[in-house]
Image (cartoon, rainbow, N blue to C red):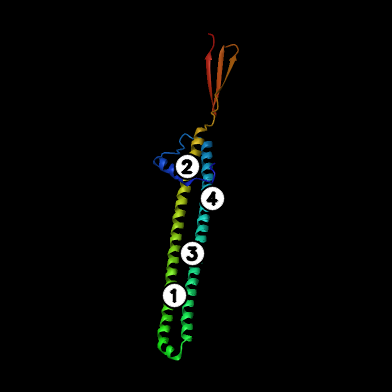
């Protein structure tokens, strides 16, 4: 039987090379009961191997998708923290500037400074929305790629199954069950010069009689 490890590229090349023959291959015409049983057994074994490949591929792809999603989440959190920290620094600087002013300066600059603080907060909100959108787009891309990878893995697994089944079929077709040889037995009858020839062929019996001498 084929090993569950396989080369998807080689399997695909094999599929492209042999797909035109599909429908005319693996005929059991001329197979005896033993060969048919062997072929059924081979199919079941290869189906199980295919299931194992599909499950392993799905698990690997899902794990990779989860790892990438976690990385995107962490990156989004880092960017948001950086934006929040930078905005806070700017706001604190403006507040400190306002605090250090004389009453006359505050009267002139307070409205302008408060307006600048409001703009910083609005900019922070906009930037965080942008970060969120970028993160969502990346997650969507990862999900789409994972779906495409699963589809490719299933196709490669199916192609590998077809290739392995072709190999199994070819090997089984070469194995012919030895036919039972015909056995004959000749006995001489005393007196009448008669001979009796009996032979076993398969499950039946044949008998020949003839005159010997005169």
Going from the N terminus, do you reach mark 4 or mark 3 first?
A: 4
Q: Bin the neighbour count of mark 1 within 10 Å (Cα to Cα): few under 14, some 14-19, many 20 and up.
A: some
Which residue is most to the bottom? 103
Q: Which residue is mark 1?
A: 124
Going from the N terminus, do you reach mark 1 or mark 2 first?
A: 1
Q: Nearer the viewer, mark 3 or mark 1?
A: 1
Look at the numbered disc 1 and give the secondary structure of its residue. helix
Do residues under tags 2 and 4 come within 8 Å of each other at their CB atoms? no
Q: Bin the neighbour count of mark 4 within 10 Å (Cα to Cα): few under 14, some 14-19, many 20 and up.
A: some
In the image, residue 83 sits, relative to residue 12, either above or below, namely below
Do we see residue 23 in this rendering? no
Q: Nearer the viewer, mark 1 or mark 2?
A: 1
Q: Which residue is mark 2?
A: 163
Look at the numbered disc 4 and give the secondary structure of its residue. helix
Q: Position of residue 118 (x, y in %)?
A: 42, 81
Rendered image: mark on residue 72? 3
Going from the N terminus, do you reach mark 3 or mark 2 first?
A: 3
In this view, the residue in front, 72 or 149, is 72
In this view, the residue in front, 94 or 35, is 94
CA distance separating discs 3 and 2:
39 Å
Q: Bin the neighbour count of mark 3 within 10 Å (Cα to Cα): few under 14, some 14-19, many 20 and up.
A: some
Q: Nearer the viewer, mark 4 or mark 1?
A: 1
Rendered image: mark on residue 52? 4
Do residues under tags 3 and 1 come within 8 Å of each other at their CB atoms? no
Rendered image: mark on residue 148? none
CA distance separating discs 4 and 3:
30 Å
In this view, the residue in front, 141 or 27, is 141
Going from the N terminus, do you reach mark 4 or mark 1 first?
A: 4
């Amino acid at each position: 039987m084929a090993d569950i490890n396989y080369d998807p590229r080689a399997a695909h090349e094999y599929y492209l090379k042999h797909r035109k023959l599909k429908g005319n291959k693996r005929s059991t015409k001329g197979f005896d009961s033993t060969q048919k049983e062997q072929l059924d057994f081979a199919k079941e074994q290869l189906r199980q191997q295919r299931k194992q490949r599909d499950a392993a591929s799905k698990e690997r792809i899902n794990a990779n998708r989860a790892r990438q999603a976690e990385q995107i989440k962490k990156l989004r959190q880092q960017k948001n923290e950086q934006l929040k920290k930078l905005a806070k620094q700017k706001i604190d600087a403006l507040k400190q500037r306002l605090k250090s002013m004389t009453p006359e300066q505050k009267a002139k600059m307070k409205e302008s400074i408060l307006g600048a603080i409001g703009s910083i907060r609005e900019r922070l909100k906009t930037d965080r929305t942008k970060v969120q959108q970028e993160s969502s787009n990346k997650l969507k891309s990862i999900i789409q790629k994972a779906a495409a990878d699963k589809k490719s893995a299933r196709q490669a697994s199916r192609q590998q199954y077809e290739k392995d089944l072709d190999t199994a079929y070819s090997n089984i077709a070469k194995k012919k069950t030895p036919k039972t040889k015909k056995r004959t037995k000749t006995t001489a009858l005393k007196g009448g010069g008669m001979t009796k020839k009996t032979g076993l062929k398969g499950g039946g019996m044949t008998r020949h009689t003839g005159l010997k001498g005169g």
